[in-house]
Amino acid sequence: MVVQREFDVHTRARGTVEITADVAGIVRDAGIGVGVVNVFVRHSSCSVVLTENADPAVRRDLETLAARWAPDGDPAYRHDEEGDDDMAAHGRAILAGATLTVPVADGRMRLGTWQGLYLWEHRTMAHRRRVVVTVLG
Amino acid sequence: MVVQREFDVHTRARGTVEITADVAGIVRDAGIGVGVVNVFVRHSSCSVVLTENADPAVRRDLETLAARWAPDGDPAYRHDEEGDDDMAAHGRAILAGATLTVPVADGRMRLGTWQGLYLWEHRTMAHRRRVVVTVLG
Amino acid sequence: MVVQREFDVHTRARGTVEITADVAGIVRDAGIGVGVVNVFVRHSSCSVVLTENADPAVRRDLETLAARWAPDGDPAYRHDEEGDDDMAAHGRAILAGATLTVPVADGRMRLGTWQGLYLWEHRTMAHRRRVVVTVLG
């Protein structure tokens, strides 16, 4: 059995937006007891990630690290049509990924207590991001 | 058809623990000929990874690289309640991931000869880590 | 319903080879309306990635970044039997991944307009790489 839904996330700037409840709602409505759910973004400059959901400082520190992994405005970049954050965003997206799969048990995501699902905007400006959620079981 | 099982890995310290045989056993017992298996850790400070399974030096060198990707005790971190390795572990987990999916054929994982499945503990202390394995086919 | 196919990619050197059309063809032939497709490489020194498909400079810049993430011939590496690019390739493969899952809708991958699927060769020499594609729905 397969249920697929899509929704938009309106990001305001670089940073994370929690989508755990959005995905949990789709999983619950799907009525699938055991299986998996895939969460996918249709973009190459944002990510979906699993990370610690208690202390917001974790996500701020992830920004600090990401700014080293793929710096904005690096003089070595040749792709910079859309600004200093353009290529940095593609680099960050390779590292953090655009797709992830979470197990489902008893009709709910089998996340750990401290795991949250986040859309991570890598561009500095606001964007509309499309998320595709597919529940299989 | 879906089969889901869970097991614990008791890590001793930062480093990798091979779980290829554990997952292979679950796949075999599932009796699913063709499909996929998802392996997931319910934590934000350890990973599941696929890497070279022949020379242990590869995994030691991955530690060397990871210590650069997300250094312990970096003065820029604001999240450090649990010690110098706390935020470093979350950063490493973003890069290496908490979930991966492997194809199944003839009732076995379709791994390459030199591919092994590892739980990678990113914290420096011992932990009990919960792994969720879901076979679909 | 599950359909699984495999194909080889003959890489010429370090760099990306687009495989979007190959995977799209397998998805189309599978005749699965809604579901997911998993793309997997049976190797620990190359990756499958989703990235920007319009400007080739993006993939060149990803090489620039990857050369910092896991430098060739780093004196700290202990695993170097196959040359300066050996351990670097394993490090890059951890970061970029060997497996990814894309949603399928109306019998087609639900990729964004600017998303392409690439096999990323991390070794400097030509290799034959085996790709396993599994469509579930």
Image (cartoon, coloured by chain):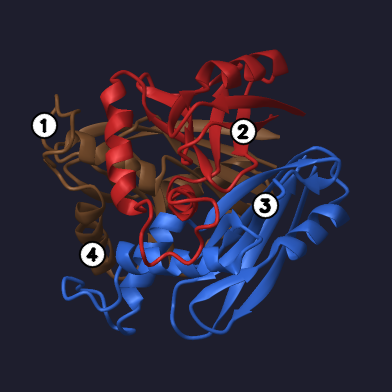
Chain colours: A red, B brown, C blue
How far separated are the C-alphas under marks 2 and 4? 37 Å
How far separated are the C-alphas under marks 3 and 4? 35 Å
In the rendered image, which residue does mark 2 sit on?
A129
Q: Is residue A56 above or below residue C56?
A: above
Q: Residue at 37% of width from left, 53% of height from top?
A: A70
| Nearest to the observer: residue A84 or residue B25 | A84
Type of the residue with mark 1: Gly
Question: Disc 2 sits on a residue from what chain?
Answer: A
Q: Residue at 37% of width from left, 42% of height from top?
A: B94
Type of the residue with mark 2: Arg
In the rendered image, which residue does mark 1 sit on?
B83
Q: Is residue C4 left or right of residue B101?
A: right
* Disc 1, SS: loop
In the rendered image, which residue does mark 4 sit on?
B61
Type of the residue with mark 3: Trp
| Nearest to the observer: residue A51 or residue B118 | A51
How far separated are the C-alphas under marks 1 and 2? 35 Å
Question: Disc 3 sits on a residue from what chain?
Answer: C
In the rendered image, which residue does mark 3 sit on?
C114
Q: Is residue A37 visible?
A: no
- Structural crowding at the residue carrying mark 1, measured as other residues with C-alpha within 10 Å and reported as few (<14), some (14–19) or many (≥20): few
Residue B117 place in picture, x, y as percent: 41, 53
